[in-house]
Image (spheres, rainbow, N blue to C red):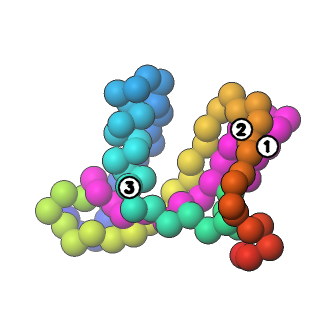
Amino acid sequence: MNGEFTPIRLRAEDAEDLKIVSACLQDAIVPITEIGWLPDDQSFVMVVNRFRWEAAGAVLTRTNCAVTVQGVTGVKRRAIDLGNR
């Protein structure tokens, strides 16, 4: 590997797909400022900093990625201080 990588695009349509997405996002860092709900689009979006688990055999590095969840009609939060950014 020469330091370059091909971005991955994942789409979860069932529980098995969701397991793969979950594995890719394991240990991700999500700043509160990078989370949003777009009610008109019924989308929940966030930018996460994750390990590139798919780079098997290589030194693990982090990369930013966008995560979008479609069909979200409401969002609730618990014990998250939005003022503490």
Q: Nearer the viewer, residue 15 or 54?
A: 15
Q: Position of residue 78 (x, y in %)?
A: 69, 54
Report how many numbered discs are placed on residues in the image.
Answer: 3
Is 43 magenta? The answer is yes
Q: Position of residue 19 (x, y in %)?
A: 36, 37
Q: Nearer the viewer, residue 14 or 82?
A: 82
Task: Identify the main secondary structure in magenta.
Answer: strand
Stretch of the chain drawn in magenta? 36-54
Which residue is rendered at x = 46% and y = 31% of the image? Answer: 12
Q: Determine which residue is flagged by label 1.
A: 38
Q: Determine which residue is flagged by label 2.
A: 43
Q: Secondary structure at mark 3?
A: loop
| Residue found farthest to the top | 14
State yes or no: discs 2 and 1 in contact (Cβ < 8 Å).
yes
Q: Amino acid at mark 2?
A: Ser
Q: Secondary structure at mark 1?
A: strand
Q: Position of residue 42 (x, y in %)?
A: 76, 33
Is 66 magenta? The answer is no
Q: Amino acid at mark 3?
A: Gln
Image quadrant holding the N terminus, namely bottom left
> Could you tell which of marks 2 and 3 lies nearer the N-terminus?
3
Residue 26: assigned label: 3
Whole-number angstrom distance, CA of label 3 to CA of label 1: 24 Å
Residue 57: assigned label: none
| Residue found farthest to the bottom | 84
Which residue is rendered at x = 19% and y = 67% of the image? Answer: 58
Left or right: where 38 falls relative to 52:
right
Q: Residues within 10 Å of mark 2 (few under 14, many from 20)?
A: some
Where residue 5 sits, quadrant-wise, is: bottom left
